[in-house]
Amino acid sequence: MIIVTAGHVDHGKTTLLQALTGTDADRLPEEKKRGMTIDLGYAFMDVSPDCRLGFIDVPGHEKFISNMLVGVSGAKHAMLVIACDDGVMPQTVEHLDILRLLELDNLIVVLTKVDRIDARRLKEVEQETQQLLASYNGNVSGLFAVSSITGSEVETLREHIKQLVIKQTAQASIQSFRMAVDRVFSVKGAGLVATGTVVSGAIELDQKLYSSTQNQTLRVRNIHSQGRQSLAAHVGDRVALNLTGVDSHSGLNRGDWLTSLKPAPPLDRVTAIFDGQQGIKHWQSVHVYHGGSHSMARVSLLKSLQQNRALVELQLEQALALTKQDRIIIRDAAATKTLGGAQVLELTVPTRAKRKPERLEYLSQLANCLSPTSALQFQSRFKPVLITDFCWSWQLKDKQLKQLFSQLQVVNLAGYALHPELLVLIRAQLLSIIDEYHSQYPDQLGLAISRVQRMSHGKYPFEIVNKVIADLCQQQTLKMSRGLVHLPKHNIELTEQETLLWQRISSQCEQANAPLWVTDFAMLNDVTPKSMRHFCYKLVQLGFLTSILKDRYVISESIYCYAEHIRSHIHNHGEIKTTEFRELVKLGRKASIQILEFFDRSGFTSRKYGSNSRVIRDNELFTREEIWRKNIGVEPTQDCWQPYPDLKSGRLTGDDVLPLERTG
C-alpha cells in the first residue's frame, strides 16, 4: 500500500513524514539547501513484521506541479496536508482537485503546525477545511491536527494509518504487470535500476518484461519492494527493479512503461470522457499528463454532457502508451491551471463519422463499462472486437481471457470476438448484399469477397467477412465459382448465339496462338468493340478466357499450359528468363513479357531483384481448376500476395505490381 502526500509548499509534508517514519524524504542536496521538496521523495513505515507501508512525498510548489503529478499518478490513498498558520492556500485547492480526479479509495486530512497557533485559529482552519472538503466527493477517512515538532497527536495519526493498512484487503489482480517508471539510476556492481509503483498485476524474479521504448525483452535480475529485497511485488507496491537487456542508446527514462504484455504502438489519438470543474472548448490547446509522461494536445469536443463532463477526442503531439480506463490530468496551455481529468474510453479512433448519434450513444454506454467483462459483453454485441487489442486495452492474461470467453459465450472468429447475435446479423447482411446484387445485375456471376466487404460499408473487417463467407459456402448457403461468391440458385450461361460466338473466338485464339485484343475479336466476328468487350467480361466470369491486361485475352487453357512450361523449366534450371520463356511458348517478346508480368501480379512467380529472371513464388497456383480459383484471389496460400479480381478492367487489382523481392 502506498500513501502520497499533497498540499501547498512549506506546509510541512516532508517534516510530517519524518515524524511518522523517521526518514527524511528530501534526498537531493538542492532540496536540503532550500528546505523545499523539488522532486519525489520516499519513506517507509513498518506496520507488522510482514507488512510495510510506503509514502511518496511530492513537491508543493506550483512550478514543480509536473513532478507532483508523476507521484500521484497511480495513487489510491493520499494525505492532504494543511498548515494551520497559513490555512487553505492555492496549491491546497489545486492538489485536492487533482486527487478528486484520481478517484482515491481513502483521503486523510492532516492539519500541521498546531504548536504555532491557538485554539481559536485551529477552529477557523478546521472550518475552512470542512468548506474545502464539501466539494470533494470521495471518502475522507479522518481529520487530524498534529505537530511534527512536538509530536502532538502524531501517534494517533500513525495508529489510524496502520488500521487503514490492516483493513486494506489484498486483491488478486486479473490484469498483467504494468508499471510507470518515475526514476532511473545505476548501481555499481548491479547495473540499471528502474523504480515506480505497480499499477496492475505482479512481478517475480527472472520474469521477462517489455519497455514501451524498445523492442527487445528485459529480464528482472533483482526486486526491492517497499524498500526491502523481495522475490515478488504486487499491485500497489513501491518497487525498484534491477533490469538487464536495456538498450544502451535509448535506455529507460521517466515516463516509460514496463509491461509483461508486448506493448502496442503508442497512440497519438484517443477517445476519452472529460471531467472538470468547468467546461472545455472545442480545439482547445492543453497539457496532458499520464503517469510520468507529458504531451501537448488539442481537444476535439464530441459531445457535452452534464456537470462539466464531455466526450472528447485528444489529439496528442507526442504519442503515449495508453490503455483502457487510464486516467489523464489536463491543464491549460500555459500550464498554470488544472482544467480537469479524462478517462480513456477508446484506443482506436475512427477517421470519419465521429459525431454520428449512434457512435455517441455507443461511447456513452461504453463509459459505463468499468470492467473487462462488461466491456466485452457490450462491445462484442456492437462490433467485432480484435482480441489482441482488447487484451492490451485491459492488460489481460491468457487465462483470464479464456474465462471471459467461456463466461460470456463469445465466439472467437478469425482473431475477433463476436457475440453470437452479431454473427447471425453479419451473415444475414452479407446474404442480403449478394441477393440484392443478383437482382440488380443478373448477367453478372457474383462478387469478389473484397467487394462484398466494401459493399457492407467497411463495417466488418475483411477477415470476418472472409471467414463468414467460407462458412456459408461450406454450408452450401453460398457458392464460390472462379473466385466469385454467389447464391447457389444463381448462375450465368451462354445463349445459343453466344455459344456459337464463343466457338468462333476459341478457334481464332487457337489459330493465332497468341493473346488477342478485343478489337481483334470485334473485327474478325463483325461485332462492335463495345459489345465484344461486354461479351469478353462474361467469358472471363465463366472461366473461358483470362485477361492478361486490359482488353487483351488468352484462352484459360493456354494460361495453364504456360504455367506448366514455367514450372518445368524452373524445376530443371532453378529460374526462367524472358528469352527462355519466349522460346518455350513461341510468342513475341511483348506478349511474353505481358504474360510473365500477369503471373507476377497473380503471385505465381516473382521477378528477381535487378534481373530478368523469375522464380516460383506459389507453386499451388495455376493447376487447372483449383489453380484458376486461386488465380483470381481466392484461398491464397500463407505467403502468397492476394490479388482481387476486377473483371471489367481485366486486371488482378490491389497492387498493380508486386513488391520487389531480393531472392537472389
Image (cartoon, grey):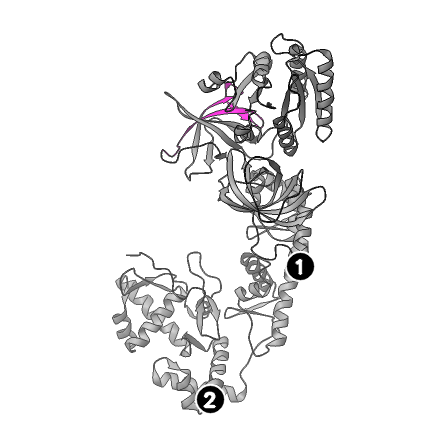
Disc 2 is placed on an element classified as loop
Quarter of the rendering occupied by the N terminus: top right
Residue at the (38%, 83%) spot, across then down: 509
For marks 2 and 1, give the one nearer the viewer.
Answer: 2
User: Label 1 sits on what residue type?
Assistant: Leu
Question: Which quadrant of the structure image shows residue 12?
Answer: top right
Horizontal and vertical percent position of residue 8:
60, 24
Residue at the (55%, 75%) spot, across then down: 445
In the orientation shown, which residue stands out farthest toward the top?
150
Disc 1 is placed on an element classified as helix
Q: Is residue 288 left or right of residue 609?
A: right
Q: Is residue 334 magenta?
A: no
Residue denoted by label 1: 425
Q: Is residue 233 magenta?
A: yes
Q: Which residues are magenta?
A: 222-249
Q: Is residue 367 visible?
A: no
Q: Nearer the viewer, residue 530 or 304?
A: 304
